[in-house]
Image (cartoon, rainbow, N blue to C red):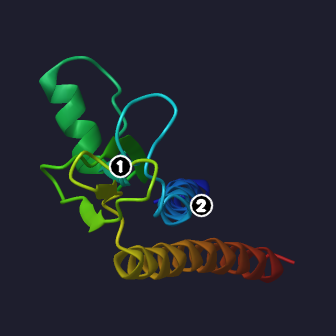
Amino acid sequence: MRFLSSIDVSASGLTAQRLRMDTIANNMASAEATRVANRPGPYRRQVVLFEARTPQKGSNFASIFKNTMQSAGSGVRVRQIKELDDNDSAFRRVYEPSHPDADENGYVTYPNVNIVEEMINMISATRSYEANAKVIEATKGMATRALDIGR
């Protein structure tokens, strides 16, 4: 793997984990939102889905296979930000008949956001971000030392 390629792989990880942290923070901020502007119902928890970033040089199978086998990895990219609906994780229903968003039975539907789960995901994203930053720092240090040897 070339010097700049390793920095590019880690930079893609930094970008992806930063978006993940932003999405988690948005989930936590909206944990009590019983309505959203663009659709009916409570806020729906969002998750970031990643996929491997692969070089796609060439259009036939042989060239794609050769490029994939020769590359040690090209980083990660965000495939999509998915909203989890009621089928993926259940909304909380709380009996609050005086709440303006209560249904005819007096129940309010709250978002499917679990703060503890979001905090665990935030810690994981932060650690991944830090690891990618350390890789970039180590790569720059190795390059500096290599240049010092040449002096």
First-in-chain label (1 vs 2)? 2
116 vs 46: above or below: below
> Which residue is pictured at 34% across the width and 51% down the height?
102
Q: Is residue 22 visible?
A: yes
Q: Is residue 72 visible?
A: no
Mark 1–mark 2 Cα distance, whole angstroms, equals 35 Å
The total number of labels drawn is 2
Where is the N terminus found, in terms of image quarters?
bottom left
Q: Which residue is mark 2?
A: 7
- The secondary element bearing badge 1 is classed as loop
Q: Which residue is mark 1?
A: 44
- The secondary element bearing badge 2 is classed as helix
107 vs 120: above or below: above
Mark 2, Cα crowd under 10 Å, few <14 / some 14-19 / many 20+, is many
Drawn side of residue 34 relative to residue 6, left or right? left
> Which residue is pictured at 35% across the width and 72% down the height?
114
> Which residue is pictured at 35% across the width and 59% down the height?
97
Percent coordinates x, y for residue 35 in the rendering: 45, 44
Drawn side of residue 109 relative to residue 60, left or right? right
What amino acid is labelled 2 in the image? Answer: Ile
Where is the C terminus found, in terms of image quarters?
bottom right
The picture quadrant where one finds residue 65 is: top left
The picture quadrant where one finds residue 53 is: top left
